[in-house]
Image (cartoon, helix red, strand yellow):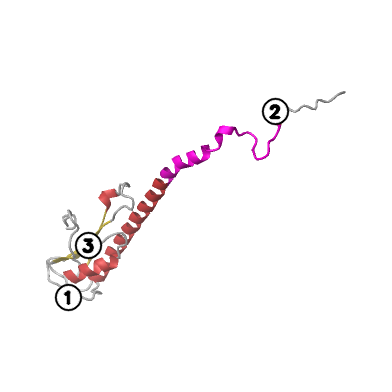
Amino acid sequence: MATNSRVSRSSRRRPGRRPGRRRGDHGATAVEFAFIVPVLCAVLFGIIDYGLYFNESLNVRHGVREAARQAVVQNVGSVTAQGMADNAVAEVGAVAGTAYGRVVVPGEWKRGESVIVCAMVPAESMVGFVPLPDDGLVKSKTSMSIEVETTAVAAGSAGDTGTPAGQDWSWCA
């Protein structure tokens, strides 16, 4: 029985070539990578932007709650509405933008009345095309009952540390 010593052309291996690849496929991977990279970068920056936004949201909530707690137990350096608003901004510790705070003192500073502490931070997107909730404005409002009575706080007063451009404190009442 004679064996055929001929090997088909397609089954022969040439040095430097992988089986199954045609001559025109050499740059296809680079082109596909170039198409995918912008999409992956957009997704990555979107994840980072939303992560920073949600981190800022948690900072504002915690800061407002802590400032309100310090106000109702009179654990703030300056016992005025303005001093409490300054303390609220310090407690927020904004990362992505400038923090603004406001404190609304009740008509009478007595036990059981409520102090309202609000803060807002305009957060900006890193890349500019990621739409952040509420136009990137992080807001938080907390109301707590007064536990320690004092006459040092002006009744019915309010203090704030300013307002971001185009915003107002109408939601903090």
Q: Position of residue 153 (x, y in %)?
A: 15, 73
The kind of residue tagged 1 is Thr
- The magenta stretch spans residue 17: yes
- Residue tagged by mark 1? 150
Q: Secondary structure at mark 2?
A: helix
Taking the spot 24% from the left edge, 64% from the top edge, the residue there is 144
Q: Are marks 2 and 3 in contact (CB under 8 Å)?
A: no
Could you say where residue 12 lies in the image, as x and y percent from the top left? 71, 32
Q: Label 2 amino acid?
A: Arg
Residue where numbered disc 3 is placed? 100
Label 3: how many Cα within 10 Å (few below 14, some 14–19, many 20+): many
Query: Residues in magenta?
Result: 12-40
Q: Which mark is residue 9?
A: 2
Residues marked 3 and 1 touching at CB (< 8 Å): no
Mark before the other along the chain sequence, 2 or 3: 2
Instruction: Locate the C terminus by quadrant.
Output: bottom left
Q: Which of pointers 3 and 1 lies earlier in the amino acid sequence?
A: 3
- On screen, 115 above or below 139? below
